[in-house]
Amino acid sequence: MTRERPITGERAHRAGAGALAPALALALVLAGSAFAQDADPAANPSATDPSAASNGAEAPTRTPPRRPGIETVSPLRAGSPTSPLLGSSTAGSSSAGSASTNLFGPRAPVSPGDAPAASDSTGDDGVSRLPRFRTAPGLTGGATVNGARPSLLRQRAAPPRRLGSATKQITQARTQQTTTDLRLSPVIQNPVSGVPLPATFVRLGLVNPANVLGLGLGLNTIAQGSLKPIDPAYAPLGIRIGALTLLPAFTQSIGYDTNPNQTIARSAQPSLVLRSEGELAVRSDWSQAEFTSEMRGSYLEYPDNPGASRPNAIGVSRLRIDANRDTRIDVETRFLLDSQRAGSPDLNAATASRPLFASYGASVGVQENFNRLQVSLRGSLDRQVFEDARLSNGTVIRQSDRDANQYGVRLRAGYEVSPMFTPFVETLIDTRIYDTPVDQYGLRRDSDGIAFSAGASIEMNRALTAELSAGMQHRSYVDRSLRPIDAPLVSAALIWTVSPLTTVRFNQQTGVIETAVPGSSGAFTDVATLEVQHDLFRNLSINVGATYLSNNYEGVRIRERGYSAFARLDYRFNRWLTFRGSYLWSTLTSSSPNSSYEGHAVLLGVRVNP
């Protein structure tokens, strides 16, 4: 019968420590002072007193003397812990030994006097194979750091206190902490999208906007772009030059047009159409200013009707400078190059080709905020020039007497009732001066105009943004034979995000434009455009829209009513390649002889974003 000795004195101390080894292992490793006291021969006489073994106690492995300071070898990386509570392999205390082995893997026996060495055990290898993006504090082992041994470093800065299991702590430290190697961090480039587009049509003033029914087929409009930002996966990244991002694009299309010259049905000559279009959009990345620009130019070639071939270009650039918190400076430049249709009342003749005209200008304004009150003053300068027309018999129709300049000043004051609603009042004064004081019909067409309007800017939850205004305008002419014009002034611009997939845009504008019709002082014009975009898929969108046009010539009995409808499909293969198909139907009914027309056009093309 085995006689068990009572557990008293130093044996009780060793037995209790062995039983608590799994729970206190990590705390004793980091508690350097307690660790050193347990390993000190004076504090642990059983480690050096041979009488303990002679009394029948199991002889523990002799612990070598400690070096000065705190030992840096972690029980997870060393082959044999030096603490008797962390793995003193005893023959009698199996519970302590098994607990230590289960936690940290088997250990090679250490003879007295051997220094701690790196372990090749299976458990330690599992930890060492973890990805080492960042070394956790206190896991440097026996390696040197900047030429100094870790033991010296630990004397200067005590390691942070650990919580939880040692193995779990190491795993979290090596797999869940942020990597410091920047080469392993992904580089994300935000797509450039949502560049502001110019107005749907130019400000009604000098030029005749009868060609807005073309809707981007080389006529008097800007080809409508996306109503909302393109999906980031298919948005062009652009070309970065300093703080500017350039977004070039080129589109080549082929199609068929039933009435390229937009003339009466009996004179229509259908033709194949080849359209080449280049675009350039610019977007800035400045802290206290913003620059946006979009320019488009195209050329339509009709092989079966060469007289209808013509260029088209339009562009708008805007610069905003934030002088301070309450002062803003706005600068805008614009240009338009287009052609007159053969049946226009201003020509009053069947021309052999479509004569070109150009309009360009700039405006500069300052906006000052007085708390909720916003006051802006803007001055503008616009000019238009016309090319002489040539008839089929060689006769030249001079149009240089239509070249003119327009100077205007616009004053606007608004009060921000809330971030969603800002009412405003606006006054516009302008004058139009022709290069030739008297035109070929003996009329002096210089004129002065004034307009008053009131409206509001509305923004509701970013789903609906609108600016609506209404008022009256008056224009008087130098020549007494030209009747003054009084007309309503209506302006509307609305963008409604019906859903994340559907967007609606509506524009309406009225104005008094210049004309060369004998006996007419000018034409009152009203243009309205509605467009809807719906995304069928992330890379497939469809645009449908319609346009209404009304021209009433003052002093003569000429009335024009125009309608058009279009549909466009864009399929994006990737960021730089898009397939585009479009269809346009347009018609114009006029009381002027040989001015009415109707036509259909279909285009299929490929758009490339380098």
Image (spheres, grey):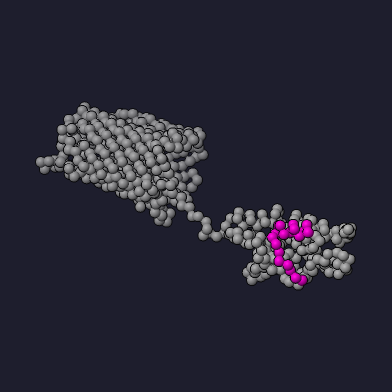
Residue drawn at the location 50% of the way across and 33% of the way down: 417
Residue 592 appears anywhere in the view: yes
> On the picture, is 172 further left or further right than 90?
left
Of 277 and 51, nearer the camera is 51
Residue 148 part of the magenta-drawn span = no
In the rendered image, the residue lying farthest to the bottom is 113
**Which quadrant would residue 154 be assigned to in this image?**
bottom right
Question: What residue lies at 23% left-to-right and 29% top-to-bottom?
Answer: 589
Please state the extent of the stretch shown in magenta in the rendering: 94-112
**Residue 90 sits above or below residue 328 on the image:** below
The residue located at (67%, 56%) in the rendering is 167
Q: Please state the horizontal and vertical placement of residue 301, each as a whole percent of the image.
A: 22, 45
With 256 as the anchor, is 378 left or right in this view?
Answer: right
Q: What x and y, as percent, mark residue 339?
A: 23, 41
Q: Please, which residue is most extreme toward the left here?
A: 393
Answer with the quarter of the image where residue 141 lies.
bottom right
